[in-house]
Image (tube, rainbow, N blue to C red):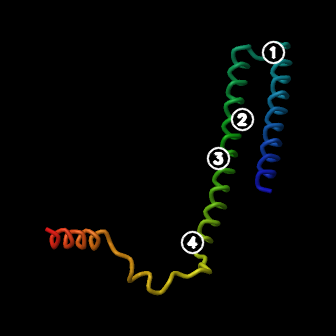
């Protein structure tokens, strides 16, 4: 569902951006033909509009990624809070030896063997 929603959002936003760019290109073409604005200013305006459209589209992509990360983190926190259905054995804690205890027993064994 999430991938479908993101895909349809991306399709709609990219389609809207393309339609706006095509409309703007048509308007600038008609203004250029009628000599209302110099070509250099129209070109500068087109580059500026393209920059703004691409930037706003990227902001939307980053927002979608942030929302996805928030959803994933809530799932992780649910897993952390979950109480396991299989418990550890009661005497497991007393039977676990630390690396220091293992080194001490090896040292004591090698000392008595020599």
User: In front: mark 1 or mark 3?
Assistant: 3
Q: Is residue 89 above or below residue 6?
A: below
Q: Of the numbered discs in the image, which one, if any, rests on residue 62?
A: 3
Q: In terms of sequence position, does the residue under pointer 1 or pointer 4 come before the other? A: 1
Residue 51: give x, y in percent of width and height.
67, 31
Residue placed at 81% from the left, 23% from the top? Answer: 25
Which image quarter is the N terminus in? bottom right
Looking at the image, residue 26 sits to the left or right of residue 68; the answer is: right
Q: Of the numbered discs in the image, which one, if any, rests on residue 80?
A: 4
Q: In terms of sequence position, does the residue under pointer 4 or pointer 2 come before the other? A: 2
Q: Is residue 87 above or below residue 75?
A: below
Q: Of the numbered discs in the image, which one, if any, rests on residue 53?
A: 2
Q: Is residue 17 above or below residue 105?
A: above
User: In front: mark 4 or mark 3?
Assistant: 4
User: Disc 1 marks which residue?
Assistant: 32
Label 1–label 4 contact, CB within 8 A: no
């Amino acid at each position: 569902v999430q991938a479908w929603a993101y895909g349809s959002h991306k399709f709609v936003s990219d389609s809207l951006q393309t339609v706006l760019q095509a409309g703007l290109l048509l308007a600038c073409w008609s203004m250029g033909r009628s000599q209302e604005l110099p070509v250099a200013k129209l070109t500068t305006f087109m580059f500026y509009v393209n920059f703004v459209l691409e930037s706003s589209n990227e902001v939307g992509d980053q927002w979608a990624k942030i929302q996805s990360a928030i959803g994933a983190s809530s799932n992780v926190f649910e897993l952390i809070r979950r109480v396991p259905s299989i418990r550890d054995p009661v005497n497991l804690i007393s039977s676990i030896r630390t690396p220091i205890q293992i080194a001490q027993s090896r040292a004591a064994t090698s000392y008595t063997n020599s």
